[in-house]
Amino acid sequence: MKISVILAHPDPKSFNHAIASVIVETLQSHNHDVMFHDLYKEKFDPLMPAGEILKEASLPPAIRKHCDEISIADGIIIIHPNWWGQPPAILKGWVDRVIRPGVAYEFLEGEKGDGVPKGLLRAKTALVFNTSNTGTSREKSEFGDPLETIWKNCIFKLCGVYECHRRTFQIIVTSSDEKRQEWLKETKKTVDRYFPG
Protein backbone atom coordinates (compact mmCIF):
# COMPACT_ATOMS: atom_id res chain seq x y z
CA MET A 1 0.00 0.00 0.00
CA LYS A 2 1.02 3.60 -0.57
CA ILE A 3 0.65 5.61 2.63
CA SER A 4 0.96 9.40 2.85
CA VAL A 5 2.38 10.57 6.19
CA ILE A 6 2.32 14.30 6.95
CA LEU A 7 4.07 15.76 10.02
CA ALA A 8 3.60 19.35 11.18
CA HIS A 9 5.69 20.35 14.20
CA PRO A 10 8.63 22.79 14.17
CA ASP A 11 10.72 21.11 16.89
CA PRO A 12 12.62 18.00 15.72
CA LYS A 13 12.85 16.89 19.38
CA SER A 14 9.07 17.05 19.85
CA PHE A 15 6.87 14.11 20.76
CA ASN A 16 5.15 14.64 17.41
CA HIS A 17 8.42 13.71 15.72
CA ALA A 18 8.70 10.60 17.92
CA ILE A 19 5.16 9.61 16.88
CA ALA A 20 6.03 10.14 13.21
CA SER A 21 9.19 8.00 13.53
CA VAL A 22 7.23 5.10 15.02
CA ILE A 23 4.60 5.41 12.28
CA VAL A 24 7.12 5.42 9.43
CA GLU A 25 9.10 2.50 10.94
CA THR A 26 5.92 0.47 11.48
CA LEU A 27 4.66 1.07 7.95
CA GLN A 28 8.04 0.20 6.45
CA SER A 29 8.18 -3.00 8.52
CA HIS A 30 4.94 -4.01 6.75
CA ASN A 31 6.55 -3.21 3.37
CA HIS A 32 4.26 -0.29 2.65
CA ASP A 33 5.43 2.48 0.31
CA VAL A 34 5.70 5.50 2.64
CA MET A 35 5.43 9.02 1.25
CA PHE A 36 6.65 11.03 4.25
CA HIS A 37 6.76 14.81 4.53
CA ASP A 38 7.99 16.88 7.46
CA LEU A 39 6.41 20.17 6.42
CA TYR A 40 8.63 22.38 8.61
CA LYS A 41 11.84 20.64 7.57
CA GLU A 42 10.84 20.97 3.93
CA LYS A 43 9.88 24.62 4.48
CA PHE A 44 6.50 23.99 2.88
CA ASP A 45 4.99 27.32 1.78
CA PRO A 46 1.46 27.50 3.27
CA LEU A 47 0.48 30.68 1.44
CA MET A 48 -1.84 29.94 -1.44
CA PRO A 49 -1.68 32.62 -4.14
CA ALA A 50 -4.88 33.70 -5.86
CA GLY A 51 -3.75 32.00 -9.05
CA GLU A 52 -4.02 28.57 -7.40
CA ILE A 53 -7.66 28.82 -6.37
CA LEU A 54 -9.21 27.56 -9.60
CA LYS A 55 -9.30 23.84 -10.40
CA GLU A 56 -7.41 24.37 -13.66
CA ALA A 57 -4.61 26.38 -12.02
CA SER A 58 -1.01 25.73 -12.97
CA LEU A 59 0.75 24.49 -9.83
CA PRO A 60 4.39 24.82 -8.72
CA PRO A 61 6.31 21.51 -8.92
CA ALA A 62 6.43 21.06 -5.11
CA ILE A 63 2.66 21.48 -4.79
CA ARG A 64 2.01 19.24 -7.80
CA LYS A 65 4.16 16.52 -6.17
CA HIS A 66 2.06 16.67 -2.98
CA CYS A 67 -1.15 16.57 -5.04
CA ASP A 68 0.06 13.57 -7.05
CA GLU A 69 1.03 11.70 -3.90
CA ILE A 70 -2.23 12.33 -2.04
CA SER A 71 -4.13 11.21 -5.16
CA ILE A 72 -2.49 7.77 -5.21
CA ALA A 73 -2.35 7.21 -1.44
CA ASP A 74 -4.19 4.14 -0.12
CA GLY A 75 -4.06 5.63 3.37
CA ILE A 76 -3.29 8.96 5.00
CA ILE A 77 -1.71 9.67 8.39
CA ILE A 78 -1.45 13.18 9.85
CA ILE A 79 0.58 14.14 12.95
CA HIS A 80 0.33 17.57 14.56
CA PRO A 81 -0.15 19.45 17.84
CA ASN A 82 -3.44 21.03 18.83
CA TRP A 83 -2.81 24.77 18.64
CA TRP A 84 -5.85 26.89 19.52
CA GLY A 85 -8.12 24.00 18.58
CA GLN A 86 -6.60 23.92 15.09
CA PRO A 87 -3.70 22.45 13.12
CA PRO A 88 -0.57 24.62 12.88
CA ALA A 89 -0.75 27.22 10.10
CA ILE A 90 1.71 25.31 7.92
CA LEU A 91 -0.61 22.29 7.92
CA LYS A 92 -3.69 24.42 7.27
CA GLY A 93 -1.82 25.85 4.29
CA TRP A 94 -0.98 22.31 3.12
CA VAL A 95 -4.70 21.50 3.21
CA ASP A 96 -5.52 24.70 1.31
CA ARG A 97 -2.99 24.02 -1.44
CA VAL A 98 -3.09 20.21 -1.72
CA ILE A 99 -6.60 19.10 -0.74
CA ARG A 100 -7.91 20.95 -3.75
CA PRO A 101 -10.60 20.67 -6.41
CA GLY A 102 -9.76 18.14 -9.08
CA VAL A 103 -7.42 16.35 -6.68
CA ALA A 104 -9.41 15.64 -3.51
CA TYR A 105 -12.94 16.56 -4.56
CA GLU A 106 -15.02 17.86 -7.43
CA PHE A 107 -18.44 19.35 -7.97
CA LEU A 108 -20.79 17.30 -10.12
CA GLU A 109 -21.83 18.44 -13.58
CA GLY A 110 -24.37 21.22 -13.33
CA GLU A 111 -23.35 21.94 -9.74
CA LYS A 112 -22.43 25.58 -9.24
CA GLY A 113 -20.35 25.01 -6.13
CA ASP A 114 -23.04 25.58 -3.53
CA GLY A 115 -23.71 21.90 -2.86
CA VAL A 116 -21.84 18.92 -1.45
CA PRO A 117 -18.92 17.86 -3.66
CA LYS A 118 -17.94 14.35 -4.65
CA GLY A 119 -14.83 13.02 -2.90
CA LEU A 120 -11.97 11.95 -5.16
CA LEU A 121 -9.33 10.63 -2.78
CA ARG A 122 -8.42 6.98 -3.27
CA ALA A 123 -7.65 6.44 0.43
CA LYS A 124 -10.43 4.90 2.46
CA THR A 125 -8.74 5.27 5.86
CA ALA A 126 -7.07 8.21 7.59
CA LEU A 127 -5.37 8.35 10.97
CA VAL A 128 -4.77 11.61 12.81
CA PHE A 129 -2.47 11.79 15.84
CA ASN A 130 -2.58 14.95 17.93
CA THR A 131 -0.80 16.18 21.03
CA SER A 132 -2.42 18.61 23.43
CA ASN A 133 -1.99 20.34 26.77
CA THR A 134 -5.75 20.51 27.33
CA GLY A 135 -7.55 17.70 29.14
CA THR A 136 -10.19 15.65 27.33
CA SER A 137 -13.20 16.81 29.34
CA ARG A 138 -12.30 20.50 28.98
CA GLU A 139 -11.55 20.10 25.28
CA LYS A 140 -15.00 18.63 24.68
CA SER A 141 -17.12 20.64 27.14
CA GLU A 142 -15.61 24.10 26.61
CA PHE A 143 -14.28 23.94 23.04
CA GLY A 144 -16.38 21.23 21.39
CA ASP A 145 -13.30 19.34 20.15
CA PRO A 146 -12.95 21.30 16.88
CA LEU A 147 -10.18 19.05 15.53
CA GLU A 148 -12.61 16.13 15.45
CA THR A 149 -14.97 18.13 13.24
CA ILE A 150 -12.20 19.59 11.08
CA TRP A 151 -10.54 16.29 10.18
CA LYS A 152 -13.46 13.86 10.12
CA ASN A 153 -16.20 15.98 8.58
CA CYS A 154 -14.76 19.12 7.00
CA ILE A 155 -11.82 17.41 5.28
CA PHE A 156 -11.77 13.63 5.03
CA LYS A 157 -15.48 12.81 4.75
CA LEU A 158 -15.91 15.56 2.17
CA CYS A 159 -13.06 14.05 0.14
CA GLY A 160 -14.41 10.48 0.27
CA VAL A 161 -12.33 9.15 3.16
CA TYR A 162 -15.02 7.77 5.45
CA GLU A 163 -12.93 5.91 8.01
CA CYS A 164 -11.05 8.43 10.14
CA HIS A 165 -9.52 7.45 13.48
CA ARG A 166 -8.15 10.28 15.61
CA ARG A 167 -6.09 9.90 18.78
CA THR A 168 -5.04 12.78 21.02
CA PHE A 169 -2.23 12.28 23.53
CA GLN A 170 -2.61 14.59 26.52
CA ILE A 171 -1.43 16.30 28.64
CA ILE A 172 1.98 16.48 26.96
CA VAL A 173 3.65 19.13 29.10
CA THR A 174 3.31 17.05 32.28
CA SER A 175 3.69 13.58 30.73
CA SER A 176 6.42 11.25 31.97
CA ASP A 177 8.87 9.33 29.79
CA GLU A 178 7.08 6.16 30.83
CA LYS A 179 3.71 7.54 29.68
CA ARG A 180 5.19 8.66 26.38
CA GLN A 181 6.60 5.18 25.77
CA GLU A 182 3.11 3.77 26.40
CA TRP A 183 1.69 6.23 23.87
CA LEU A 184 4.29 5.25 21.27
CA LYS A 185 3.42 1.57 21.76
CA GLU A 186 -0.25 2.48 21.30
CA THR A 187 0.65 4.38 18.12
CA LYS A 188 2.39 1.30 16.72
CA LYS A 189 -0.59 -0.93 17.57
CA THR A 190 -2.96 1.53 15.89
CA VAL A 191 -0.89 1.58 12.70
CA ASP A 192 -0.62 -2.23 12.83
CA ARG A 193 -4.41 -2.48 13.09
CA TYR A 194 -5.32 -0.08 10.28
CA PHE A 195 -2.40 -0.75 7.92
CA PRO A 196 -1.23 -4.33 8.50
CA GLY A 197 1.37 -6.05 6.36
Image (cartoon, rainbow, N blue to C red):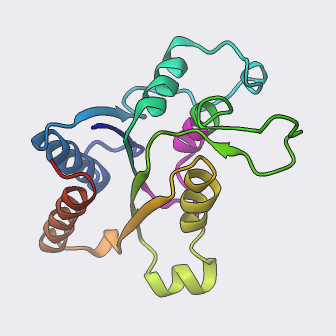
| Position above or below: 107 against 58 | below
Q: In which quarter of the image is residue 60?
A: top right
User: Residue 177 location in percent, x, y?
Assistant: 14, 68
User: Residue 120 location in percent, x, y?
Assistant: 58, 38
User: Residue 70 location in percent, x, y?
Assistant: 46, 33
Foreground: 36 or 119?
A: 119
| Position above or below: 193 against 43 | below
Q: In which quarter of the image is residue 85?
A: bottom right
The residue located at (36%, 33%) in the rendering is: 37
The residue located at (51%, 58%) in the rendering is: 162
The residue located at (87%, 47%) in the rendering is: 114
| Position above or below: 190 against 136 | above
The stretch in magenta equals 79-95
The residue located at (60%, 68%) in the rendering is: 146
Foreground: 108 or 128?
A: 108
User: Residue 156 location in percent, x, y?
Assistant: 55, 52
Left or right: residue 163 versus residue 190 is: right
Left or right: residue 5 versus residue 33 is: right
Say whether residue 89 is magenta. Answer: yes
Quadrant location of the N terminus in the rendered image = top left
Say whether residue 68 is magenta. Answer: no
